[in-house]
Image (cartoon, rainbow, N blue to C red):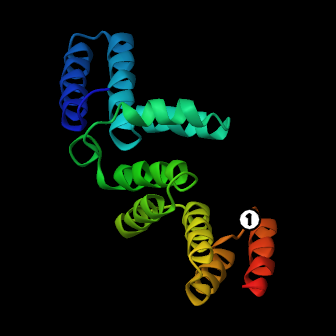
Amino acid sequence: MFHKYLKLVLAGGIAVLAVLQFIDENIGNGILLLLLAGVFVFFYFKNEILLLAFLQMRKQNLEGTEQWLAKIKNPEAALITSQQAYFYYLQGLMVVQKNMTQGEKLLKKALGIGLRMGHDIAMAKLNLAGVAMSKRRKREATTLLNEAKKLDKHGMLTDQIKMMKDQLKRI
């Protein structure tokens, strides 16, 4: 809920207080303050709103995911680069079901910024392949499906990829 730089300033201030507590020989207070500073550093790298949105997505609560994502008004200012990619990734997964063109733009933007996890990249490419397939772009859909298959190391998307390849044969 805090601005990204405010989190670092708070973590730094709390760390200074922790050092002062260590100097005053209040070791327990110093350790507790360092842990509190660590929480702010953690939330700098892992945005709390995105974590809650992912939790809602995992529960397949699309309305809850939309509500959490709506709380981020300006992702370029509020989020670091990797968080922006996941913001657009989640937005794309939500929108692609309603508006394919808008969802395609958001997913491509997320891939352009850079998703870090291979299975997230595979899921984005699988959705992009579905959009390409619905727009009759067979070559692009085939390429995206092959890339998604390479990135799906744990085999979580195998059934969906196989089903989409079967549908591609009919086009």
What residue do we see at 59% from left, 90% from top? 139
Q: Is residue 24 above or below residue 104?
A: above
When the figure is inspected, residue 111 is found, relative to residue 82, above or below; the finding is below
Is residue 96 shown above or below 41?
Answer: below
Choose between 113 and 13: the one closer to the eye: 113
Q: Position of residue 48 (x, y in %)?
A: 42, 32
Q: Which residue occupies the extreme bottom position in the image?
A: 139
Q: Residue at x 61, y 72 (%)?
A: 134
Quadrant in which residue 121 is drawn? bottom right
Q: Which residue is mark 1?
A: 157
Question: Which part of the image, by quadrant, shows the C terminus?
Answer: bottom right
How packed mark 1 is, by other alpha carbons closer than 10 Å (few <14, some 14-19, many 20 or more), is some
- Image location of residue 82, percent across then percent down: 37, 55
User: Which residue is nearer to you in this view: 5 or 97?
Assistant: 97
Residue 35 pos. (x, y %) = 39, 24
- Element type at mark 1: loop
Q: Residue 28's x, y, as percent?
A: 39, 12
- In this image, 83 relative to 57: left or right? left
Left or right of 138 in this view: 89? left
Label total for image: 1
Q: Quadrant of residue 34?
A: top left
- Observer-nearest residue: 30 or 5? 5
Relative to 86, does residue 29 appear above or below in the rendering?
Answer: above
The quarter in which the N terminus is drawn is top left
Residue 80 placement, left or right of 154: left
Q: What amino acid is found at the position of numbered circle 1 in the picture? A: Leu
